[in-house]
Amino acid sequence: MERRTLLLCGLLALTGCGSAAPTRRPGVGSARAGDRIAGLADVPTGSGALVDLPGDGQLLLVRSADGVRAFNPACPHQGTVVDPPAAGVITCPTHRSAFDPQTGAVLSGPSPKGLAEVPVRVSGEDVLLA
């Protein structure tokens, strides 16, 4: 491989150019009410999952015995996408803000507020945007 080609490939990799993968943004994006966003089997009971929505959005789904809740996964502190719940807590990997998986309320850390809840509903084995 020529040096010029190698440098160009490295530059493209660093800038993200040339990638065909769509950019996912925390939140609903272009999804609309009624859109299927996940199957119940995709969200383990007592845990959760980050799911890509139709279009360009992304949500954090949390499943308990009471049902499924959805949150915008952007930490209110600096916008980092939070991790799905582990050991009963949703955590931001950047500055360790912790959130309640049932309410999205901030439990600790620098976040000034909790995670924004997004209305969803379960229909059969599907989770739909409400």
Image: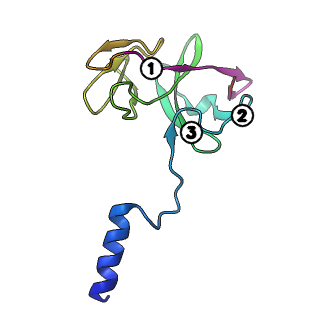
Position of the N terminus, as image quadrant, is bottom left
Residue 21: % across, % down: 52, 57
Q: Residues within 10 Å of mark 1 (few under 14, many from 20)?
A: many
**Which comes sooner in the sequence, label 1 or label 3?**
3
Residue 122: % across, % down: 69, 21
Where, by quadrant of the figure, is residue 121 drawn? top right
Query: What amino acid is at disc 1?
Result: Leu
For the residues bearing labels 3 and 2, Cβ distance under 8 angstroms:
no
Which region of the structure is painted magenta?
113-128
The residue carrying mark 3 is 57
- Residue in the foreground of this view, choosing between 75 and 37: 75
Q: Residues within 10 Å of mark 3 (few under 14, many from 20)?
A: some
Q: Is residue 75 above or below residue 64?
A: below
Where, by quadrant of the figure, is residue 2 drawn? bottom left
Q: Residue at x 58, y 44 (%)?
A: 56
Colour mapping used in the image: rainbow
Left or right for 85, reference 22: left
Where, by quadrant of the figure, is residue 99 drawn? top left
Q: Nearer the observer, disc 3 or disc 2?
A: 3
Query: What amino acid is at disc 2?
Result: Asp
Left or right for 33, reference 50: right
For the residues labelled 2 and 1, the Cα–Cα distance comes to 22 Å
Query: What amino acid is at disc 3?
Result: Gly
| Circle 2 SS class | loop
Left or right for 25, reference 38: left
The residue carrying mark 2 is 35
Q: Residue at x 48, y 26 (%)?
A: 48
**Which comes sooner in the sequence, label 2 or label 1?**
2
Q: Residue at x 34, y 77 (%)?
A: 8
Task: Please give the label number shown on residue 115.
Answer: 1
For the residues labelled 1 and 3, the Cα–Cα distance comes to 16 Å
